[in-house]
Amino acid sequence: METSIFVFSGNSNRPLAESICSILGIELGSAEVKRFSDGETSVDIRQSIRGKDIYIVQSTCSPANETLMELLIMLDAVKRASAHTITAVVPYFGYARQDRKASPRTPITAKLVADLLTVAGADRVLTMDLHAGQIQGFFDTPVDNLFAKPVVLNYIKGRFMDHLCVVSPDAGGVERARAYAKPLKADLAIIDKKRERANESDVMHIIGDVRGKVCLLIDDIVDTAGTLTNAAVALKDAGAQRVLACCTHPVLSGPAIKRINASPLEELVVTDTIPLAGEALECGKITVLSVAPLLAEAIERIYRDESVSELFL
């Protein structure tokens, strides 16, 4: 590709940025992102980018506040270095779950983060599988929300097609589950969970027939894995033959890995929007698929002023 495009990376997901650059046929931009002794973030862009098209790859994953500040400071640095266009490539958009006032006197932090990215200098945001699609409306700049579905479907097809049933782990994820079930020509089931009283476990009601089926749980984020593993137990109790899961963003915090290892889940398929760390690296149930080709294709299309919506099909 032409030398007017530069891809830089923060510290949150450098391997993904390097994979994107390898596909694009360019070198990762030279930038140093470090911290002073008091914890402040320091950014040094070590090459001229005047008049260039800049793409900054940074997932705002754990530690979320630090990775977010890295992204904001990098955006400000390239803006002040007279970049032509600046695109924030945020494979995992942190704070997306705080997208509404769930109770009185609570913030809408997803909107705050959107404002911060815009003020810092982002002309466009490229992200993947937003927790809520309406977050795109929080921005005053263009947002391209890619889906990991093509990557996941390529893995699923030919492996788990017989007696396949796609399952949404909660009522809110039905639309996402249906989007997977249709191209796979699979059955669809929904888990409706209800907590009767505080400090009591959820009661799982399964809508749909899962007896003898290969059940594929679909979600966008797996954090502590409580919902996912409880759903797997409920499906097994309802007669499911096998239970697997696909989630785009492997947050995997707290007791997630212990729960996954102790659960009936045979396999958890995730993408590399967030790099695995700690116990997750040793978990034999986790399969990682790369979204680098998808992001690289989107970056090239944005750079060439070509349609990105074709990648959604």
Image (cartoon, grey):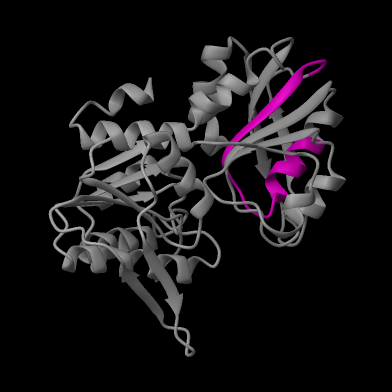
Question: Image height check: is 106 above or below 140?
Answer: below
Image quarter for residue 156? top right
Residue 310 image offset from top left, x and y in percent:
31, 21
Which quarter shows the C terminus? top left
Q: Residue furthest bottom?
A: 38
Q: Residue at x 47, y 50 (%)?
A: 92
Question: Quick check: is 256 in the magenta stretch?
Answer: no
In this view of the protein, can residue 130 be seen by the observer? yes
Residue 59 appears left or right of 142: right
The quadrant in which the N terminus is found is: top left
In the foreground, 121 or 113 = 121
Whether residue 2 is situated above or below residue 121 in the rendered picture: above
- Vertical placement of residue 160 versus 8, above or below: above
135 over 107 or under it: above or below: above
Q: Who is closer to the viewer here, 187 or 196?
A: 187
Can see residue 129? no
**Residue, x 73% and y 24% (percent of image)?**
215
The magenta segment is 211-233
Location of residue 89 in the rendering, given as x and y in whole percent from the top left corner: 36, 49
Q: Is residue 245 left or right of residue 178?
A: right
* Residue 229 lies within the magenta run: yes
Q: Nearer the viewer, residue 53 or 128?
A: 53
Residue 240, image x, y percentages: 81, 23
In front: 31, or 173?
31
Residue at 52%, 38% (x, y): give it. 172
